[in-house]
Amino acid sequence: QKEVEQNSGPLSVPEGAIASLNCTYSDRGSQSFFWYRQYSGKSPELIMFIYSNGDKEDGRFTAQLNKASQYVSLLIRDSQPSDSATYLCAAQRGNNRLAFGKGNQVVVIP
Amino acid sequence: GAGVSQSPSNKVTEKGKDVELRCDPISGHTALYWYRQSLGQGLEFLIYFQGNSAPDKSGLPSDRFSAERTGGSVSTLTIQRTQQEDSAVYLCASSGGGAQETQYFGPGTRLLVL
């Protein structure tokens, strides 16, 4: 079982719609979770982090964490073409290293 | 201030040659990480430096890989006797070093082994 799993396959959403991304993790000891956005050919950039159960909102982005279910999600509201990228979910392990999922590609269709 | 910088941005080498990749972290960041991203794969942890502590080398894939961090700042990742499967983007990240600290990534070095 991989440490962090993300749904495979690209997600296509029309402009203005909500994009929903999901992630599960295997290590119950993980306490901190991060969503990074990666444009093609670029390095990952932080979108949001979440430590506590529940929702955390930042602009058009909402992260949700459910530690009992070992589940993290990211919602992108009012999706824009500029949101088209790969979104990486990461769980922080011991020694602070991050375990990443393979990523979800999001394509926002104008 | 300046972000994480890496050099070279691209490196093409022949199988069997040694390569050195450099990372300059954000000023004041005590923690430095190396990750590798192969085509179509997620980021794979390689090594972690925190201050003057012994590095966590648990992610290094073979003894051909080594890294050092001089003066608690710049780090060099060395790959000896490169193989074609070493071709990947090598990403460096730095953070303040505390738990739950965000890691900020550099632009990466794209390594191609022919």
Image (spheres, coloured by chain):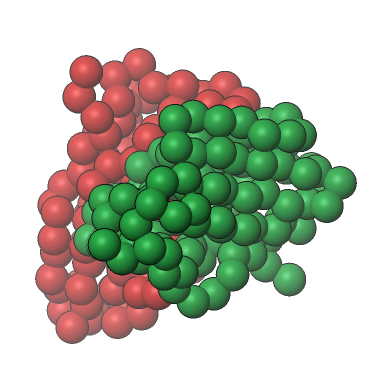
Chain colours: A green, B red
Q: Position of residue B14 (x, y in %)?
A: 16, 79
In this orientation, which residue lies closer to the viewer: A9 or A99?
A9
In this orientation, which residue lies closer to the viewer: B70 or A96?
A96
Q: Position of residue A63 (x, y in %)?
A: 59, 40
Q: Residue at x 62, y 50 (%)?
A: A73
In this orientation, which residue lies closer to the viewer: A17 or B79?
A17
Question: Extreme right residue here?
Answer: A68
Q: Is residue A15 left or right of residue A40?
A: right
Q: Position of residue B4 (x, y in %)?
A: 26, 34
Q: Is residue A66 left or right of residue A38?
A: right
Q: Is residue B106 visible?
A: yes
Q: Residue at x 31, y 79 (%)?
A: B83
Report the number of numbered marks: 0
* A66 relative to B10, above or below: above
In this orientation, which residue lies closer to the viewer: A33 or B44?
A33
Tell me the quarter of the picture where residue B25 sits.
top left
Q: Residue at x 54, y 48 (%)?
A: A75
Quadrant location of the C terminus of chain A in the rendered image:
bottom left
Quadrant location of the N terminus of chain A in the rendered image:
bottom right
Q: Residue at x 36, y 42 (%)?
A: A45
Q: Is residue B60 visible?
A: no
* B10 relative to A12, above or below: above
Q: Position of residue B32 (x, y in %)?
A: 42, 35
